[in-house]
Image (cartoon, rainbow, N blue to C red):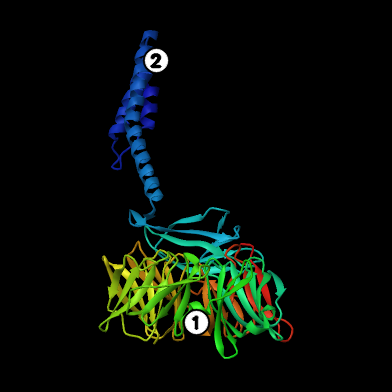
Amino acid sequence: MDFGPSYAKTESIRPLAENGQASQSGSLETLFNTLADFTFTLPPFSCIIALVIKIEQRKIYLYFIYPFATLFFIALSFCFIMSARGYLVVFDNGIKFEKTGMIIGSTNPPGAKIFLNGKDISKATIPFLSTKINNLKKGKYILDYEKDGFYTWQKELLVSPERVTWANYALLFSKNPKIEKTEIGGKLLGSLNSKDNKYSIFLVQNADNQIIYLVNNSDDSKDDVFETAKMKPEERISGVTLIAWSDDHENLLVKGMLGAVEQYYVINTSDKTSENVTGLLPAGFSSPMFNPANGDELYFALNGQVLRVNVPAKTSQAFSEKGILYFSVEKNGNIYYIKDNAGARSLWQANGDFSNPSAITDGIPASENYSLTVSSQGQKMALQTKEGALYLIDNIDGKEMLIVMGKNISEFSWSPDGDRLLYKNGPDVKVFEFVDYKKESREYQIPNGADLRDFAWYDNDHLLAETLNNKAEVMDFDGQNKIDLAAITPGSKVFFSSDNHNISFISKSDADKFALSRYITEF
């Protein structure tokens, strides 16, 4: 028989090693091919042998393919898992896994395009949920939110490995907002804003009549709750001054002059009645304030003691605790007070009737007067002396510590959630932020803070301010994304409604009159 052609064909496809010799796998392949081709020249029963040889040849290939495929699948799965855990696969002199961070953000209103370092990342903010930008290397990024008809929101963010950087609740303000105007009339003498930002009180001089208006901040609707012209001639007071307002909006304490004698009235804003409480307040009292937990109760200080008056019942009670230099009643109904003991001053806390007193911290600096505010959680306090020094009282390692914040503080306030403290230190405006997960804090200085005449919290992340050039301004809590909303009357305050976040400010009207302008935010 002539076996030459089959043998020659096998030799022509045999793989060679680099040195020109046949490789081992090539030799096996040649051997199997030769035997297979040889058996096809034998009688039919030899076909079975040829089939077995072909199957064995395939098994040899499978011995190599399956292990490599399995290893490739494991490696690919590992890469996916590491990527899901926030690692970036970097092919730099081999395979490396670099830890990454992410940015989570949202806007109000939603539907803003997202740009990162000036590049459109083909993502947009969505309603009710946050948008994730993950697998970001460590470093600084410029994040932009852009939406037609709105001011662009931009901020520099620092991304850290295995950390989430938040850019949530960014407010986008319209370039062409709707502004509604409500005429008040008369000359503005004073104003108060409720602690929950739902209502405002305005004291107006109109000819020989002084009027107090209660204004609903959500729609600027007004209602006159007190007029001196409606009082009996023999009881009519002048020179009315706003003093204190209860947290439930019901009771307003005012002072006026009846001839040369001071008179104190509590005005009920619901039924528009007034009660002369002068006889319940002894001469020389100071620091009047309503109990936040009970608007019918009025506290005041007298000669180192604290007294409480129940206005409807017309009763007065003096507490036995003495040596009190300052006190404050907070919304939880507790009393915080500074007590002097042989020259040593300490801060205390007690129930509204001075039961269960407990010392908070000692070493309170000497001063003629103090101002104290407690954060919403009641865990942190800010204390200011009459001389302007501001102290932070916080629990550190299980002990209340007194931390100096500044020596020349003119005003300060807590954010609604109590995690940030806003204060003005000389010409500078600063925000002190508490970061619990790092057990450290950060301080932000508002750019051009000296240009701000007045400021207040809009929400946990934003501030409202009045500028020296008489503009109503809104900004992020760290001073970025400043937007001038409108021109306002010099010296007036900017306030807002907690119900719909519409922003109100006093604007010019006719001569000797004023009006309220309401910026419709649609948030």
Q: Residue 57, percent across and down?
A: 34, 25
- Name the secondary structure under disc 1: helix
289, above or below 133, in the image: below
* Residue type at tag 2: Phe
User: Which numbered disc, 2 or 1, marks the residue closer to the eye?
Assistant: 1
Alpha-carbon distance for marks 2 and 1?
Answer: 96 Å
The x, y position of residue 135, in whole percent, is 43, 56
From the viewer's side, name the closer residue of 504 and 21: 504
In what element is the residue under mark 2? loop
Percent across and percent down for residue 321 are 33, 74
Q: Find disc 1 in the rendering and name its residue.
A: 449
Q: Reply above or below: 418 against 257.
A: above
The residue most toward the bottom is: 260
Residue found at the very far right of the displayed protein:
510
Three-letter amino acid code at the position of disc 1: Gly
**Residue at mark 2:** 40
- Residue at 28% of width from left, 37% of height from top? 21
Viewer-side residue, 270 vs 3: 270
Image-quadrant location for residue 518: bottom right
| Quarter where residue 91 is shown | bottom left
- Image quadrant holding the C terminus, namely bottom right
